[in-house]
Image (cartoon, helix red, strand yellow):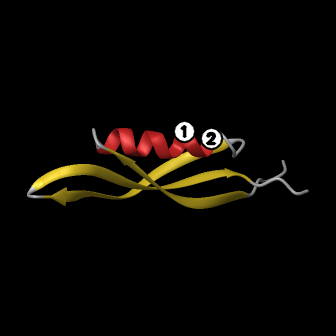
Amino acid sequence: MAGSTYKIIELVGTSDKSWEDAAKLAVETAGESLKDLRVAEITKLDMTIEDGKVTSYRARVNVSFKYIKS
């Protein structure tokens, strides 16, 4: 059985609604140009604050996809 190789990249998604939306947007946007996405791991969550109120949520996500030799 042949093995596989995967590349991992780090993405940051943002949303004014939730961390879940931020992570989903990051993965779905990457999926528009990367093929064969496999696993997404949320590595960090944070938010931006203006005038004492949360204005956006950010999710840092590591995404893996199959590496294909050219």
Q: Which residue is mark 2?
A: 31
In this view, the residue in front, 41 or 11, is: 11
Inspect the image, locate mark 1, and give the three-letter code of the amino acid beneath it.
Glu
Q: In which quadrant of the rendered image does the C terminus lie?
A: bottom right
Provide the residue designation for mark 1.
28
Residue in the image at 60% along x and 46% along y: 30
Q: Does residue 1 appear left or right of residue 47 in this picture?
A: right
How crowded is the residue under tag 2: few (<14 C-alpha within 10 Å), some, or many (20+)? some
Q: Nearer the viewer, residue 43 or 49?
A: 49
Mark 2 residue element: helix
Is residue 14 depicted above or below 48 in this figure? Answer: above
Specify whether 42 is left or right of 16: right
- Is 58 displayed left or right of 48 in the figure? right
Residue furthest out toward the right: 70
Asked if marks 2 and 1 touch (Cβ < 8 Å), the reply is: yes
Q: Seen from this angle, which residue lies furthest left?
A: 52
> How far across and how far down the image is residue 28, in percent?
54, 38
Relative to 16, say whether 52 is above or below: below
Residue 38: name its quadrant: top right
Location of residue 15 in the rendering, given as x and y in whole percent from the top left corner: 34, 44
At 38% from the left and 44% from the top, the residue drawn is 22
Q: Position of residue 6 (x, y in %)?
A: 69, 56
**Which residue is rendered at x = 83% and y = 53% of the image?**
68
User: At label 2, which amino acid type do we have?
Assistant: Gly
Distance from Cα at disc 2 to Cα at disc 1: 5 Å
